[in-house]
Amino acid sequence: MGRRRRASQKAVKPRPRKAGSQSWAPHAAPWSAVGRDLDPEAVAQMEAACTLPVAVTGALLPDAHVGYGLPIGGVLAVRGAVIPYGVGMDIACRMRLSVLDYPVAAVEREQERLAGILLQNTRFGVGAHMDPPLAHPVMDRDWGVSPVTRQHKDLAWRQLGTSGAGNHFVEWGVVELADPLGPLAPGRYLGLLSHSGSRGVGGEVARFYSALARSLHPELPGHVAQLAWLDLMSEEGQEYWAAMELMGCYSAANHELIHQRVAAALGTQAVFVVENHHNFAWMEDVGAERLVVHRKGATPARSGVLGVIPGTMIHPAYVVEGLGARQTVCSASHGAGRCLGRKEALRRFSRRQLDDVVRRAGVLLLGGGVDEIPLAYKDIREVMAAQRDVVRIRAMFFPRIVRMA
């Protein structure tokens, strides 16, 4: 998502570089698809991504839909390089679920109080910030790892502990477990679930290094130009990787602060937490080779690894355990996935229809746009059913009070 830059801030421009000398010589790396009725545009994007000279293997997940460069719900493993648009604009967009030490009946008996806590302790949308800024050790890290993070550190500090717009949320709900999970016995619990990323600074990092990568690869034809890469051995590649890692820490800090503030306002604390990125790149062993695995709108699902896959504002989220599926490069979907684009959803539906859908589901919605109406999303149950060989469902989260921009 785009972020509005303050007038007092000057954009960091990519350093001029000598054009890349490689000629375009496409090949066809293997990739697999999971699920039915996949978006044809997303399929075309995945096929194009696998023609990159650095591509080794890929996967398209059942929530896939068209994105910039790599499709959302796309996984791409490459050799010796990192693709900024393979990570995405909202670097380290992630999920966090906290199971709280508080009676689960509060979602019904204390609905007004819980709604008030969300309204008072969360900030959403472009330009949202905290005044005064919050404290967290992430701001003591080295923000000089790239010119972009150095310039935008003050912006990051102001936005620390806030959430983005669009499909980002913080919500109360009911966690249901049929089997033990960590310290939790089977049963029902009060849960707090959040979805957001690296805010304005993450967007600036993505824009800067995407433009830089494209300037280094003028040989790429238009249909893959957005998938320009940075060599990991280059100064630019090292800078982007360090900035991406910093954005991962920053995004995690945002969620940590949100959960701490909200739990403290309720007078409780978390007894169990599950969290994960789903817009990121990792160095991983794929077969016998160490590769860079880009997951753009995809949840890490290595064997035994826990993650969270959300549904919609009225449909359940799932706590899952990865099964290490090779066909998806150890990845799962990051949600239900859109079946209608935002513009089409706004054209088809009204606020009254959104409010009616939410009311009939017994959910209290605080904010939220018509483009986020659940009818614009795929059926999360079908998406999860398509991933039986990819993840094991460990728990479910049912939203009850949802806060969005």
Image: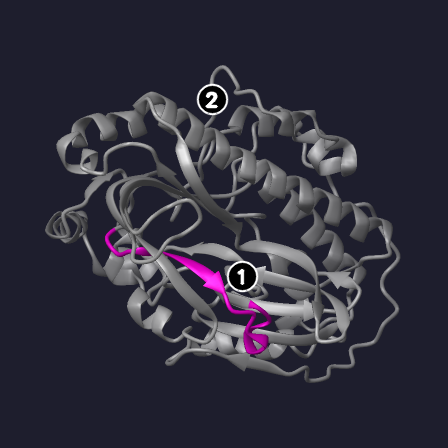
Residue drawn where x is 18% and y is 45% of the image: 363
> Which of pointers 1 and 2 lies earlier in the amino acid sequence?
2
Return the x and y of residue 316 as percentages of the image width and height: 29, 56
Residue drawn where x is 24% and y is 29% of the image: 114
**Does dot 1 land on a helix, a strand or a loop?**
loop
Q: Check the image and report above or below for 297 versus 358.
A: below
Residue at the disc numbered 2: 130
Return the x and y of residue 226 as percentages of the image width and height: 64, 63
Viewer-side residue, 266 vs 343: 266
Give the residue type at disc 1.
Gly
Q: Which residues are magenta?
A: 314-330
Viewer-side residue, 169 vs 376: 169
Q: Residues within 10 Å of mark 2 (few under 14, many from 20)?
A: some
Residue at the disc numbered 1: 304
* Quarter residue 260 falls in: top left
**Does dot 2 land on a helix, a strand or a loop?**
loop
Q: Check the image and report above or below for 44 versus 137.
A: below
Q: Is any atom of residue 290 visible in this view?
A: yes
Q: Is any atom of residue 124 visible in this view?
A: no
Q: Nearer the viewer, mark 1 or mark 2?
A: 1
Residue drawn where x is 39% and y is 76% of the image: 386
Q: Residues within 10 Å of mark 1 (few under 14, many from 20)?
A: few
Q: Check the image and report above or below for 212 versus 20.
A: above
Q: Check the image and report above or below for 26 versus 261.
A: below
Give the residue type at disc 2.
Met
Q: Is residue 248 left or right of residue 315?
A: right
**In the image, which disc is placed on residue 174?**
none
